Amino acid sequence: GGRFWSRFKRFAPTHGAGNYRYQRLSNDIVKGLKNNEFVLYYQPRIDTMTGQMIGAEALLRWQHKIFGAISPVQFIRIAEDTNFMIPLGNWVLETVCRQLRQWRDAGLPQIRISVNVSVKQLLECDFVDIVQSLLRQYEIDAKWLEFEVTETSILPEETLPDEAIRQLRALGIAIYLDDFGTGYSSLSWLERLDVDGIKLDKSFISRAPHHASSTQIVRAVIRLAHQLKLIVIAEGVETVEQLQYLQAQACDEVQGYLYSRPVPVNLFEEYLRGGRFH
Ligand code: C2E
Ligand code: CA
Ligand code: CA
Ligand code: CA
């Protein structure tokens, strides 16, 4: 008996559609948006050379009434699978635009906020219109809004969000390829999409500068990106050593726990007022 169960447990799903938590979250996600259970946290983006905060990334959190604060790692998949990513993504966009407007009205310094957008959103035919009307509604200059796009393998062959990216950049919104280097075809995306920069995935950063091949990859990718006139942001910077290595490689921006975790808006406003990072 014991043998059988231990084997069964090993194969029992802990992720994905068979799991209780997954089912529960799938059931609750639509209500969650209605009940204002989603919030945005902000994580500073730092100019590598000056150490100044020059922007921030908006990161979703779901304050679930039973499970507490949940990372998007656990619910973005659900949102994508159920097409709920579209209304959720629109909520993120509007919240950021409203926030940018509030900060400006409050006399706080203006910075660029980058928003993660899924390829599914980019491929919606009215996405660019929605963005444009939000910018108009909140009277936001497009230069304060940036998008991070993660390569996905869910796309049918040859479907690329190139048209949306072209139109968004024409509006003045900078576009970054997120998690660069971890996808199936990072280089081919870089070749085929016109973007402003890349975010070098934190898995490479976490192994630099001690692990030889990760370190070489970081260096080579920064060089490649610069040859293509792209901005490079390193994510997941946790140590001074990593920072110094990235400075030596002339990486443009850094982001990570070394400076600050993603923080709720009230703490982030302290940063905007010039307060010290937590
Ligand atoms: P991402 O865009 O690659 O975001 C970076 C993730 O790394 C964030 O996790 C952030 O909290 C975490 N992080 C930041 N600094 C460090 C560090 O120094 N060390 C380590 N180990 N981790 C660090 P988070 O917030 O859990 O987000 C996970 C992913 O969920 C994001 O990965 C992004 O792909 C997705 N996501 C978050 N917000 C949104 C959103 O509004 N829309 C969409 N479509 N996706 C989102
Ligand atoms: Ca991101
Ligand atoms: Ca990443
Ligand atoms: Ca990601």
Image (spheres, grey):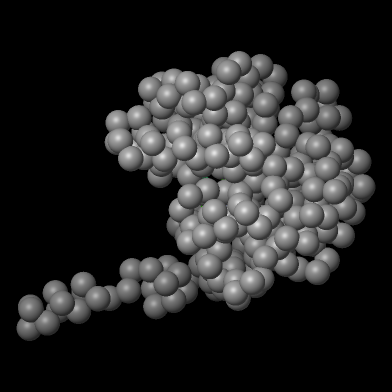
For image coordinates 45% across by 70% down, the residue present is 22
For image coordinates 24% across by 76% down, the residue present is 11
**Is residue 60 among the parts visible in the rendering?**
no
Residue 138, given in percent of the width and then of the height, sits at 88, 44
Q: Is the residue 24 above or below the residue 150 in the image?
A: below
Query: On the picture, is 170 further left or further right than 17?
Result: right
In the foreground, 135 or 217: 217
For image coordinates 60% across by 76% down, the residue present is 156
For image coordinates 58% across by 29% down, the residue present is 253
Residue 266, given in percent of the width and then of the height, sits at 65, 31
**Is residue 232 among the parts visible in the rendering?**
yes
- Residue 275 sits in quarter: top right
> How many numbered marks appear?
0
Residue 152, given in percent of the width and then of the height, sits at 55, 63
Q: Is the residue 34 above or below the residue 266 in the image?
A: below
- In the rendered view of the protein, which quadrant contains the N terminus? bottom left
In the foreground, 242 or 99: 242
Q: Is the residue 73 above or below the residue 270 in the image?
A: below
- Residue 28 sits in quarter: bottom right
Residue 139, given in percent of the width and then of the height, sits at 91, 41
Query: On the picture, is 152 further left or further right than 147?
Result: left
